[in-house]
Image: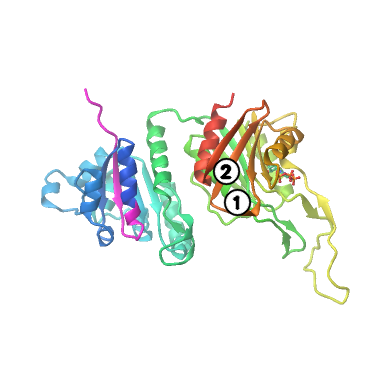
Amino acid sequence: MQKKPTTVVLIITGGIAAYRALELIRLLRKEGFRVRPVLTKGARAFITPLSAAALAGEKAHAELFSLTDETEMGHIRLAREADAVVVAPATADFMAKAAHGLADDLASTLLLATTAPVLMAPAMNPRMWTHPATRRNTAQLRADGVEIIGPESGEVACGEEGEGRMAEPAEILARVLALIQGRSAELPLSGKRVLITAGPTHEPIDPVRVLANRSSGRMGYALAEAAREKGAEVVLVSGPVALSAPAGVDVRRVETAEEMLRAVRQALAEAPVDIGIFTAAVADWRVKNASASKIKKGPEGPPVLELEENPDILATIAQARAGRPKLVVGFAAETENIARNARAKLKRKGADIIVANDVSEKTGILGGDETELLVISRTGEETRLPRQSKRAAARALLDLLSRHP
Ligand code: CTP
């Protein structure tokens, strides 16, 4: 008997990113999925049902009360057939409707009628994305079990910079695969607990000023998201960053290195950790004579800051007798002699694995969207992960870690 193809119902809503949904159809088909496109009225202002149908090799659905479709109860059939429903791009308007359970067209109706997992890839103007109404709707959708991927930061169609770009079609495909697998098979990190540190730390000089660094936190957040996708329970201890919490991840926000160490210890004390990944760019020093009140300009000239060393979180945890994660993974940000310095760091800190990256300015890795990693284990194996988006690198790294004995 021929196996029934896995069906993805792809709802395309009206935004300039709609054309990128066509690429997603192509990728889903290549992966062997049956794709049933549904276009909202808004989407049809950007792309035609014909182009979606041509790529999907299926009729593209558009109307709720189309006579031929409704003889077969189109929305109910689509909702039932779906092994996953993907909304890409998801506009602010469509998310608002879905968050409130409105059902006034085919797309919103089938969303209410389905029991399949739902993944939304928001795409909108960055200010619309950060608007409290959108935040509220996104939180509601998450609480209802909808998975959200992206949006990513970068330039959006209206020329503004910020979070608002639809996630890459390849990233959406990866998430669809995880969603569908998650229902049918064990994921590589199911039952595992993963602890991740991310972002910079801020060390106060006085109540309004801090010592900080340029870490964006992206690598740690990408790892948290990927670990969650792969089935892990994830605690993310994060310094101050401008990123939103990945879905399903327990985020604990801290400011200073000392707070970060405390939060890490707390997470370790709550339950054993299988993999600890230390990506945070922890400040090496804090201000010893930090002022309790704002330092004022005065005739005595600029203040002299005395620094003292911060705890090394990775080394402290890697060398702890009790409560050490089974696998301790550090990151090494280097600008020269990458491999040699990283190997030395691995030994010095007592980690099991060190992940080295070249953060010299020419690479654009620090604070950027892409990275290239060299994974070195205590036993001497070295694996190079080529330059790719931080999200893709995170997934590749977790695949390696999940296979680590
Ligand atoms: N790290 C940490 N706590 C610190 C400093 C670093 O947990 N106080 C961790 C980082 O999260 C990373 C690893 O140690 O996993 C290496 O960080 P890096 O800044 O490259 O190393 P440093 O120890 O600061 O060494 P150096 O500045 O001499 O390169």
How would you rate the neighbour count of disc 2 (Cα within 10 Å): few for under 14, some for 14-19, many for 20 or more?
many
| Cα separation between marks 2 and 1 | 9 Å
Dots 2, 1 in contact, CB < 8 A: yes
**How far across and how far down the image is residue 117, in percent?**
36, 41
Q: Residues in magenta?
A: 1-20
Residue 82 visible in image: yes
Name the image quarter holding the C terminus: top right
Find residue 334 and report its image quarter.
top right
Find residue 116 and report its image quarter.
top left
Residue drawn at 74 percent across, 36 percent down: 344
- Residue nearest the viewer, comparing 212 with 93: 212
- Residue nearest the viewer, comparing 52 with 150: 52
> Is label 2 in a helix, a strand or a loop?
strand
> Is label 1 in a helix, a strand or a loop?
helix
| Disc 1: which residue | 363
Residue drawn at 75 percent across, 42 percent down: 312
**How far across and how far down the image is residue 75, in percent?**
21, 46
Residue drawn at 44 percent across, 28 percent down: 186
- Residue nearest the viewer, comparing 312 with 155: 155
**Residue lying farthest right?**
300
Q: Is residue 12 above or below residue 296?
A: above
Residue 366 visible in image: no
222 to the left or right of 28: right
Q: Is residue 287 above or below residue 258?
A: below
| Disc 2: which residue | 372
